Amino acid sequence: MSTPFFTDVGSPGQPVVVFLHGVGGGRHGWAPQQAHLSVLGWRSLAWDMPGYGASAMLTPYDFEHLAMAMWQMMDAAHIRQAVLVGHSMGAMVALQAWTQMPERITAMVLAASSPAFGNSDGDFQKQFLAQRLAPLEAGKTMGDIADKLIPSMAIPGGDAAKLHQAHQSMSAVPQDTYRAALHALVQFEQRAALPTITIPVLCLAAEHDRTAPPAVMERMTQKISGARYACLAGAGHLLHYEQPEAFNVELEKFLKDVKP
């Protein structure tokens, strides 16, 4: 397994945040957050998940091995412990990582996500896969998919300029990676892990998120002892792209309480 590529902002010795993007994302999508944290005295890593950007593909492509790749990245950066901040599928990687090496995670921010998707044999999962993969089967490009999917995931009538980076990231995802990530996604199941979490957690929802609705995130919060819940107004599923300043405010408030 080769080490994933990552952007490293900050200095050795500072407390560390690791940013984990979603299915259509990439390391560049966290640039506003990395810049903000650097001013606050935090070091941060933002990876290209295996198969994305400059990171090699992974086989098998499942959450167990994605979390292992994250540990490998942290080892390469000589980081023992970190706060994990995950968006959507990235938050699922964070939950998976908790089940492997909880002693290496000091806190987690789970944004616009859920503790389970289901299994590949469920009707909902089959319909989801068929719907998301249909454009590729019809010969469409990832850019074509981004044209339709990005606006549908954001708040209706939102600022298109703020979604430019999200569109660029999704357009650049290799088709094989996108297929593999979706197949992994529908098999994710970590509901049983929630009551075992003993570190500070922020579950961050978005008011207009139809992919991971606030009600789903509220239920997840209730199953994690001591977890905090916050909901960003005026944002959809792509909350850190749509409302980067508001996202940073919630992140900063949380990190103030967990900074060593």
Image (cartoon, rainbow, N blue to C red):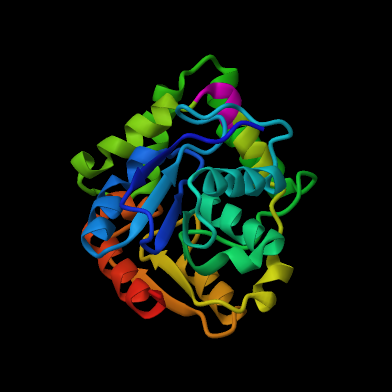
Span highlighted in magenta in the image: 174-178
Q: Does residue 38 appear anywhere in the picture?
A: yes
Question: Quadrant where the C terminus lies?
Answer: bottom left
Nearest to the observer: residue 186 or residue 197:
197
- Is 250 drawn above or below residue 64 in the view shown? below
**Residue 138 placed where, x, y %?**
56, 17
- Compared to residue 126, the image places residue 40 above or below, namely below
Q: In this rendering, would 78 be left or right of 1?
A: left
Quadrant, the N terminus? top right
**Tally of numbered discs:** 0
Q: Nearer the viewer, residue 137 or 54?
A: 54
- Residue 34 appears at what percent x and percent y? 30, 52
Furthest-right residue in view? Answer: 121
Does the image show residue 133?
A: no
Q: Which residue is at a point 57% across and 81% down the rendered structure image?
A: 222
Q: Quadrant of residue 193?
A: bottom right
Residue 94 covered by magenta stretch: no
Q: Quadrant of residue 97?
A: bottom right
Among the 4 quarters of the image, the one containing residue 73: top right
| Position of residue 81 in the picture relative to residue 160 (left or right) | right
In this rendering, position of residue 193 left or right of residue 84: right
Residue 214, x across and y down, in percent: 46, 68
Across and down, in percent, residue 233 comes to 28, 67
* Nearer the observer, 77 or 84: 77
Choose between 199 and 16: the one closer to the eye. 16
**In percent of the image, x 41 and y 76: which residue is there?**
258
The furthest residue to the bottom = 226
SS majority, magenta: helix
